[in-house]
Amino acid sequence: MKKIYTLCFFLSALLDIAAGQEWKLNYGVSAGATNSIYLLENISSGVGRSASKTYNGQVSGWAMISPNKYVGAEGGLAITGLGAVLNQSEFGSREVRQHTYWLQVPVNLVAKLPLRDTSNFFLKAGGYAGFGLFGKNYIPDSYSGSAKQGFSFGDSGTQKGVDFGWNVSFGYKLRSGYLINLGYQRGLRDLAPGQAAYEQRNRAYTVGIGYEF
């Protein structure tokens, strides 16, 4: 019985602490650029596959709930452009730019360092799930091979259409609500199509400007 009383007292104390917090809900939007490349691993002998960086864009929106001015939890939606320049691939040794566009659902924990003027530095870290929307291969006009410009998501397509991974970002929010942030995201799922002789994962650096209401 004593243990039950102790547990009830502990739960009651937690509820009192939670009730005493001034929970705050904020919304935000941002837009920016991505610098992305494929992480290629376990390439079979005799298979030519290499990539370099390309640039794309990102737009996002989020909602953040905070019990105080130091921490918060955030969820959102983003349309993120990724891809890479394929230096060696099914297109041969000719550079082909591949852009892919994803609907991403990030969930992050947020740590804040408030300053005297109510601006703050912030650090966000968490995970995301991504769903392929569409993609495109930008093939040089001089290319004369049989590979096509078309792109499709799926196990039998150009690459798999479901991704997940982790992300981290650091930024500064002005007193007025405007903010700037730098981030990095790393896919954990192998997106190479079925029967591929290599593994391929997304990764990208991001930079954005936005506004938090």
Image: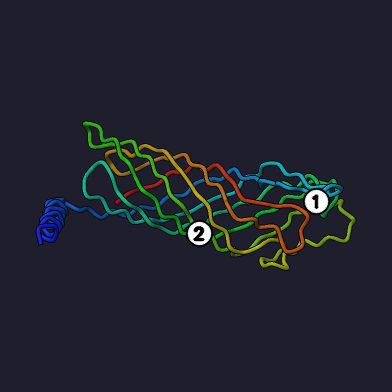
> Left or right: where does residue 115 sit relative to residue 128?
left
Point out the frontmost of discs 1 and 2: 2
**Residue appearing at x 59%, y 43% in the figure:** 35
> Left or right: where does residue 92 sit relative to residue 21?
right
Q: Which residue is mark 2?
A: 129
**Residue appearing at x 50%, y 49% in the figure:** 166
Residue 146: x percent and y percent?
Answer: 88, 61
**Residue appearing at x 66%, y 47% in the figure:** 38
Q: Which residue is mark 1?
A: 89
Residue 56: x percent and y percent?
Answer: 60, 48
Residue 182: x percent and y percent?
Answer: 47, 39
Between discs 1 and 2, the one toward the N terminus: 1
Q: Quadrant of residue 138?
A: bottom right
Label 1 – label 2 distance at C-alpha: 27 Å
Residue 162 or 98: which is nearer the viewer? 162
Label 2 packing within 10 angstroms: few (<14), some (14-19), many (20+): some
Q: Mark 2: which secondary structure? A: strand
Q: Quadrant of residue 70?
A: top left
